[in-house]
Image: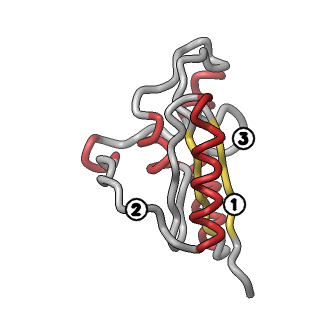
Amino acid sequence: MGRRAIDISADGPNNDGIDPDLARDLAVAMGITINGLPIINNRLQISGLKQMPNYDHYFQDCVIGGPGAFMVVAKNYDDFATAIKRKLLFEISQAPPPKQPLLVKAAIEGQRDCAKGINDKRH
């Protein structure tokens, strides 16, 4: 069987459906890798709030997963085209991005709320 991957690009936390970490864990259990491209921005989310601080940490802790999973961060909407090209090159070449400093895991900071966007929408 060939490589199986899901690519997720987003600018805010999940705001509907099951928690993203549960969906990720189900996909990973089926042998699917999830790579990501979080877009950092100042636009108001569906909740009316600004984007959560350290959105890239949310992506790392709640979205990406599986063997060789990685993400490329778009620093803003203008950076999206460059970021998606970089991400596609890494995926096609099957070469991981250059080593980046590891983000502080939520386990150290305290539990990250992977259902934050869903919970914000309900209020």
Q: Quadrant of residue 5?
A: bottom right
Q: Nearer the viewer, mark 1 or mark 3?
A: 1
Q: Is residue 90 visible?
A: yes
Could you give the CA–CA distance between mark 2 and mark 1, rounded to whole angstroms?
A: 21 Å
Q: Decide which of tag 3 and tag 2 comes sooner along the chain.
A: 3
Q: Is residue 115 left or right of residue 108?
A: right
Foreground residue, 22 or 96?
A: 96
Mark 1 to mark 3 CA distance (whole Å)? 17 Å
Label 3 or label 2, whichever lies nearer to me, is 2
Tag 2: residue type?
Pro
Quadrant for residue 13, please give it. Answer: top right
Q: Residue at x 64, y 76 (%)?
A: 31
Question: Disc 2 on helix, strand or loop?
Answer: loop
Which residue is at a point 60% across and 17% down the rendered structure image?
Answer: 43
Q: Nearer the viewer, residue 44 or 75?
A: 75
Q: CA distance from mark 3 to mark 2?
A: 33 Å
- The residue at which mark 2 appears reads as 98
Q: Which mark is residue 17?
A: 3
- Where is residue 21 shown, x and y percent of the image? 55, 51
**For residue 2, above or below residue 79:** below
Residue situated furthest bottom in the rendering? 1
Q: Is residue 16 left or right of residue 24?
A: right
Q: Position of residue 101 (x, y in %)?
A: 30, 53
Q: In the displayed image of the protein, which residue is found farthest to the left?
A: 108
Residue for badge 1: 6
Q: Residues within 10 Å of mark 2 (few under 14, many from 20)?
A: few
Which amino acid does the dot numbered 1 rest on?
Ile
Q: Earlier in the sequence, mark 1 or mark 3?
A: 1
Above or below: residue 60 compared with residue 74: below
Q: Is residue 123 visible?
A: no
